[in-house]
Amino acid sequence: MRIHTKIMATLALGAAALVSPVGPIGAKSAGAQDFPAKPIEVIVPFKPGGRTDVVARMIGEKIKEKGLLNQPLAVVNADGGAGANAVNRMQRGDDNGHTIIHWHHQALIAMAMNLGDFNLDDFKSIGYTGGGSPVWVVREDSEFETFDDLVAYLKENPRGLVEAVGIGTIPHFVGAMLANEAGFETRYVTANSAADRLRLLLGNNADIALFAASEYLAQGEGLKPLVYFGRERLPDLPDVPTATELGYDVSWANPNWWLAPASTSDENVAILEAALAEAIADPEIVEYFTNNTLEAYWTPGAEAMADARKQLEALQAVAATIN
């Protein structure tokens, strides 16, 4: 099993940050406190079986197995309404941490496009438990060997390349954030799924497309990755630079984001943070993430919210071009 030293160091630091002078505020000492007083409902804004749902259930099982909280996590699915159904369910539930959401940064796209009656002020961030980042690719026989080659061409030939995207989707927003930062434009052809993007790219009907790193690695042939949107290079793609190391302040980790109602007390959020930080550091969880081309890390709630606000500003700039 390959576990990255830096990831594990980050997890250790995250866990250490949640230790008080008299010991951890995790499950075992939390038993003497009033929270949680009943099972915690974890709302997933998608149908069962997707990454967000699977990770929520895995972490819930790990918390139960290790006794990290004195009550279980009960995962329920509430898809639809661009996340509004999940948020409405959260707001109808207990307002002090017994009803929470497990989402990712699709929530920020919904906010940027005003697709639901909710915003960041409706939530208190508990933290990120890992995530996965995409790659921007061209065909294997493309003339572009590096991302700098592609940028130079597009600056000389504005809109001279075709990008396969679904308007309003993650591939659209992530590609547009990079284009805005690097100062170029592409023109779009509609592709609402990874299969559509792959078909258009390999069929010479598009020049560029974005895929999850796992999708690219599963495809294997016919594609050439130029830039990765993680914060660090992916071990499975050691020769593919990140956008940030190329000098562009753009990243997209699409993290597993745990959110509570804004009214939740800091004390209860700290108890949840401690449990999640220990769960994501478990070797079995790290192995699952590594095997699925995901990154296992812990980001505390306040730091995660600061990151989300920065990402939202960039997404709103993209949304302004299509609204």
Image (cartoon, helix red, strand yellow):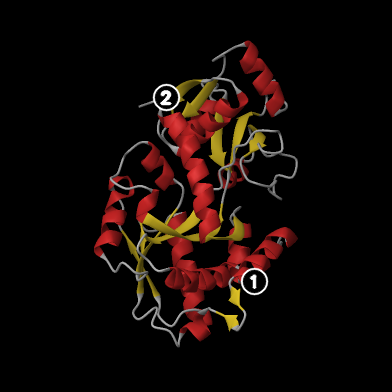
Whether label 2 touches label 1, CB < 8 Å:
no
Residue at image coords 60%, 84%: 22
Residue 180, given in percent of the width and then of the height, sits at 55, 26
Name the disc covering residue 269, or none: none
Question: Which of the two residues, 232 or 189, is positioned nearer the viewer here?
Answer: 232
Asked whether residue 188 appears in the rendered view, the answer is yes
Element at label 1: helix
Of all residues, the one furthest to the front in this rendering is 21
Compared to 278, does 121 lie above or below?
above
Element at label 2: loop
Query: What amino acid type should be assigned to the residue bearing mark 1?
Result: Ala
Question: Which of the two residues, 146 or 270, is positioned nearer the viewer here?
Answer: 270
Question: Which of the two residues, 301 or 182, is positioned nearer the viewer here?
Answer: 301
Residue at image coords 75%, 40%: 239
Name the disc covering residue 321, or none: 2
Residue at image coords 46%, 30%: 317
| Left or right of 252 on screen, residue 93 | left
Quadrant location of the N terminus? Answer: bottom right
Q: CA distance from mark 2 to mark 1?
A: 43 Å
Q: Quadrant of residue 292?
A: bottom right
Callout 1: 10 Å neighbours few (<14), some, many (20+)? some
Q: Quadrant of residue 70?
A: bottom left
Name the disc covering residue 16, or none: 1
Going from N to C along the chain, the mark reached first, 2 or 1, is: 1
Quadrant location of the C terminus? Answer: top left
Asked whether residue 46 appears in the rendered view, the answer is no
Callout 2: 10 Å neighbours few (<14), some, many (20+)? few
